[in-house]
Amino acid sequence: MASAASIPSSSQPESSMVRSSNIFSIKELAESKGDSSLIPSTYHSISQLHEDDDDDVAEYLASSIPVIDFSHLTSHHPQTHSKAVHLLGKACAEWGVFMLTNHGIPENLVEKLMEKSREFHDLPIEEKKEFGDDKSPLEPIRLGTSFCPQVEKVHYWRDYLKANTFPQFNFPHKPPGYREVAYEYSQKIRELARKLLEGISESLGLASNSIIESTEFDSGHQLFAVNMYPPCPQPHLALGLPPHSDIGLLTLLTQNGIGGLQVKHHGKWVNVNPLSNSITVILADQLEVLSNGRYESVLHRAILNNEETRISVVLANGPALDKEIGPLAELLEKEKPLFKSMKYQDYFQFHQRTRLDDKNTLYEIRLN
């Protein structure tokens, strides 16, 4: 994606200085602009990237993103399982992202989820306003645009619905059937995440229940996010989301067939082109902390296009909110800690109320 400098704000008409905190929906903003080829200068996020940020896209690496066969990981055949655990550990250590196949979630459930997600975002604004603004990260249901407009220098071309779906399930009651579909999907995702964490524990040379027990995962927090990225007239100037890492242990993502996710690998951006009926799994910050840096959370971003609406459904699966998370004790028997411990609730709230910028939240708890 080519970089482009933004026009200085002083040369922009007043109407171009749109603040995300003053609008309810990017979809509405995009539709109100009609055929206009210009976006507000306050959304020129590409020019705000770090000067040393390599914007090159390594297309040749897209086919190298690891693929993990879930049926092999859960196999009762010792050799099949052992090989899958080895491949899982390799994917975590070398990429921090992988595609999960044969996961058992029905394809028609995912299709229904995408259909209902679009219906939700297409609801009239007045019907969505009852779910409230994004006032607190621990609000059961939140609606908003960008990421955290109050602290951003520039904004991002995204509308979102966020709901805390575990240990208590919260979700909008409209459109009809959406809540039921989301509940079924969120439960299945938790089951997948739990099995993956068992395999990751084994790949670290630990007991399969080590991460589960140390994080109290069975009462852990799950954040369900539904992102809409409308077509952008100037996709070379704007981003859906900037380079960042995720909160929690594992993020499981699916999308509506429209690409836009990129991950950072050895200094290059790589397009994630999911296999049919696969789920993209992204390693998040608390897994890097627990593994004492062996398995790093991966930087990723959302790019835009000027033709089609992209929808992604993202579930961040984390520890219990009141659990203090630090490097696993078993790993510290032979190495020094790289991170200080922090209660997950504190980390979660800090991340959700801070400007997205690389792995800035994780750097706050890194030692030395």
Image: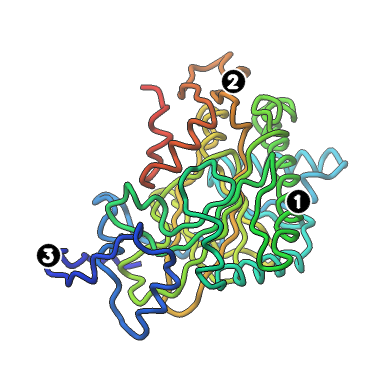
Q: Earlier in the sequence, mark 2 or mark 3?
A: 3
Q: Are marks 2 and 3 in contact (CB under 8 Å)?
A: no
Image mark for residue 10: 3
The residue beneath circle 2 is 331
Q: Position of residue 328 (x, y in %)?
A: 60, 22
Residue sitting at x 16%, y 64%? 9
Rendering quarter of residue 90? top right
Cα separation between marks 2 and 3: 54 Å
Badge 2 element: helix
- Residue in the picture at 43% in, 36% down: 350
Picture disc at residue 91: none
Q: Name the quadrant containing residue 360.
A: top left
Tell me the quarter of the image containing the N terminus. bottom left
Instruction: Give the amino acid at mark 3.
Output: Ser
Q: Say whether residue 337 is visible.
A: yes
Residue 64 seen in the figure: no
Closer to the camera, 85 or 116?
116
**Which residue is farthest top?**
333
Viewer-nearest residue: 281 or 114: 114
Task: Please provide percent x and percent y for residue 203.
Answer: 67, 34
Percent from the top left, x then y, of residue 68? 69, 51
Disc nearer the start of the sequence (1/3): 3
Relative horizontal placement of residue 11, taking residue 327 as reference (left or right): left
Q: Which residue is mark 1?
A: 188
